[in-house]
């Protein structure tokens, strides 16, 4: 299972067998059940999660008591509350498994030690954070420039794996829709 992480890592930097063995020793291999919470609002965010298999989501509960999904992570994606993780702060988010998932988990102290001992991993994380930041910028742009229908169409065209795999009520939450509106929109597209 950890070989999946190695393949992902080697897209950004080369590692020897002995380096990889040392690198992976900084992580814990964890399996979580569907709908298991890994992080709850108010907890100190202590972990960074790499998805080997399955799907996670990050969300918050808005003042009306509605869950608002801000991010998903499928295979080969990282997820955490970056601000809370980096600053050892209580989080304003939840991280929950959407499916039964297998993860590599690293805590803050271990990640810092890993980065100090393996500069190439620091470079790897720089690439990962750059891509995540770019994706976040584009999502903000889409929120401001697309109609609700265009946002759904864009997601459906660019990431059909999400639309097929993720429960529709979570897709609606991610897009800022009600599940009812998404059902209407999908029915309209079929007719």
Image: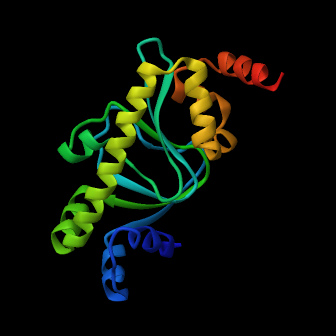
Q: Position of residue 110 (x, y in %)?
A: 24, 64
* Identity of the residue drawn at 24% across and 39% down: 83
Q: Nearer the viewer, residue 150 or 23?
A: 150
**In this image, 173 relative to 95: left or right?**
right
**In this image, 155 relative to 126: left or right?**
right
Quadrant for residue 91, please give it: top left
Q: What residue occupies the far right of the structure in this picture? A: 191
Q: Position of residue 186 (x, y in %)?
A: 73, 24
Q: What residue occupies the far top of the structure in this picture? A: 64
Quarter of the image containing the C terminus?
top right
Q: How many marks?
A: 0
**In this image, 110 relative to 67: left or right?**
left
Q: Where is 43 relative to 9, above or below?
A: above
Quadrant for residue 116, please give it: bottom left
* Identity of the residue drawn at 48% across and 16% down: 65
Q: What residue occupies the far left of the structure in this picture? A: 116
* Identity of the residue drawn at 50% across and 24% down: 67
Q: Where is 181 relative to 109, above or below?
A: above
* Identity of the residue drawn at 25% across and 62% down: 111
Q: Nearer the viewer, residue 78 or 26?
A: 78
Q: Position of residue 107 (x, y in %)?
A: 29, 58
Q: Position of residue 31 (x, y in %)?
A: 53, 60
Q: How is the image coloured?
A: rainbow
**In this image, 27 relative to 145: left or right?**
left
């Amino acid at each position: 299972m950890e070989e999946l992480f190695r393949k992902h890592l080697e897209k950004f930097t080369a590692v020897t067998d002995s380096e990889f063995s040392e690198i992976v020793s900084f992580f814990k291999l964890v399996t979580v059940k569907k709908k298991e919470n890994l992080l709850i609002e108010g907890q100190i965010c202590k972990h960074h999660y790499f998805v080997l298999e399955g799907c996670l989501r990050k969300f918050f509960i808005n003042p009306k008591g509605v869950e608002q999904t801000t991010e998903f992570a499928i295979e080969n994606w990282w997820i955490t509350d970056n601000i809370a993780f980096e600053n050892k702060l209580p989080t304003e988010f939840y991280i929950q498994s959407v499916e039964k998932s297998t993860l590599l988990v690293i805590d803050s102290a271990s990640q810092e030690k890993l980065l100090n001992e393996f500069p190439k991993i620091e470079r790897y994380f720089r690439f990962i954070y750059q891509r995540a930041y770019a994706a976040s910028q584009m999502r903000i742009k889409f929120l401001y420039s697309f109609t609700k229908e265009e946002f759904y169409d864009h997601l459906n065209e660019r990431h059909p794996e999400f639309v097929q795999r993720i429960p529709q009520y979570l897709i609606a939450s991610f897009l800022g829709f009600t599940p009812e509106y998404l059902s209407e929109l999908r029915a309209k597209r079929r007719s």
